[in-house]
Image: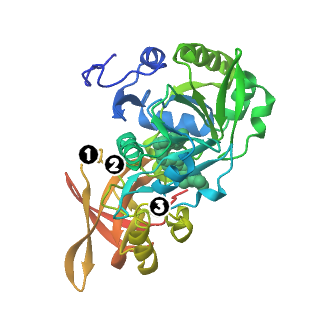
Amino acid sequence: MTNPILTLSPRIRATPFSRRVEIAGPKAYTVYNHMRLASFFESVEADYHHLKNHVQVWDVACERQIEVRGRDATRLVQMLTPRDLRKLSIGQCFYVPIVDETGGMLNDPVLLKLADDRYWISIADSDLLYWVKGLAYGLHWEVDVIEPDVSPLAVQGPKADDLMARVFGEEVRQIRFFRFAPFEFDGHVFNVARSGYSKQGGFEIYMDDWALGERLWDRLMEAGQDLNVRVGAPNVIERIEGGLLSYGSDMTRRNTPHECGLGRFCDTFNAIGCIGRDALLRVASEGPVRQIRGLAIEGDAVPPCGVPWPIHGDEDGEDEIVGRVTSAFWSPDLKTNVSIGMVRMTHWKPGTRVWVELPDGARDATVRALPFI
Ligand code: THG
């Protein structure tokens, strides 16, 4: 690693692609599901422009899979989420809120149905495995819960289809959004989905044999030379503009899916057996009193949002804290600071003027609908 700000140890797990990522020289890493995740390479802004114009390969092995398998697999997975899984078919992905008994968000994974008795839960950054294993054990159901050797590799950007077609064949272009299918690579079969943590389009390859990681990586990089392929990573500017939330930052166990703007992924009434169903039926009928919003923050580029920044607003002539900003960055395309925060109902209407308390002073801001773009 070029800039050893992060002390490495086996506790911060390497991925099948880590040696390749290291050669590319990320300028920062973060830790996600106890695993390395590069933050950016050239600069956050340069990576952003490149992602929007070309194609990038991302080591997102940290999107760990929880495999749920067995006769009671469907029953157990339905217990985890208020989304109605009877509508999920084999070969399909669902973005699913996972909630506890109070309706609090535990994770916001992508769920893949591999077979009637087999699922992958592609998790965000929280230790969901223990919740699911605990339920399976406590219920004595016929189900196995494991973390398999699966490491997603994302190919994102407007040229992703062209690059993927060169490596996996023209048929990859036929994969529809949030669907997946098996594709062959050197005699081995990987699930390939049209999905990913960007709004630029692209795929995720569920690479399930550690030994093939570098070969797959090298093949993509070679095949994409004239497409200007680069190593990349989920980009904070692009994902804020696109309204993609980050679990642990933009939402925690203290938030319901409705507060997170994820009510459209809940069919709580029909999600029979779902943990937190009663709590969610209540909040769904009453409606949340605070909700995720975009905020355009005025002035020069903001510093990194390391701790939530209080949002202040006028309430009957008094200055009150009306929310918190949890993600923020300068957007070169929108020429303002884009941010995501939780905002109280009194101030959540787009266009509302507020001010944000940054570490280096106050900034005027305007509430915006998500996505920005
Ligand atoms: N892909 C996979 N696993 C993941 C992520 C991913 N696990 C961690 C993290 N990302 C989970 N969070 C999200 C957040 C948003 C989306 C996917 C995973 C997403 N949302 C789309 C949107 O909001 O526009 C589409 C949702 C839909 O319409 O169903 O893609 O990225 N494998």
Q: How is the image coloured?
A: rainbow
Q: Give, as a three-letter code, the residue at label 3.
A: Cys
Residue where numbered disc 3 is placed: 274
Q: Give, as a three-letter code, the residue at label 1.
A: Gly
- Residue count near mark 1 (Cα–Cα under 10 Å), binned few <14, some 14–19, many ≥20: few
Query: Above or below — where is 137 with respect to 169?
Result: below
**Mark found first going from the N terminus, 3 or 2:** 2
- Distance CA(mark 1)–CA(mark 3): 34 Å
Give the quadrant of the C terminus.
Answer: bottom right
- Residue count near mark 3 (Cα–Cα under 10 Å), binned few <14, some 14–19, many ≥20: many
As helix, strand or loop, the secondary structure at mark 3 comes to loop
**Residue 250 visible in the snapshot:** yes
Which of the pair 47/56 is nearer the observer?
Answer: 56
Q: Based on the displayed image, in which of its 4 quarters is residue 186 positioned?
A: top right
Give the quadrant of the N terminus.
Answer: top left
Give me the disc on residue 333: none
Residue where numbered disc 2 is placed: 248
Residue where numbered disc 1 is placed: 306
- Distance CA(mark 3)–CA(mark 2): 22 Å
As helix, strand or loop, the secondary structure at mark 1 comes to loop
**Residue at 42% of width from left, 36% of height from top?**
44
Q: Give, as a three-letter code, the residue at label 2.
A: Gly
Within 8 Å of ligand 1, the CB of disc 3? no
Query: Above or below — where is 189 with respect to 280?
Result: above
Counting from the top left corner in percent of width and height, residue 78 is at: 52, 55
- Residue count near mark 2 (Cα–Cα under 10 Å), binned few <14, some 14–19, many ≥20: some
**Residue at 24% of width from left, 86% of height from top?**
316
Q: Is residue 118 left or right of residue 291?
A: right
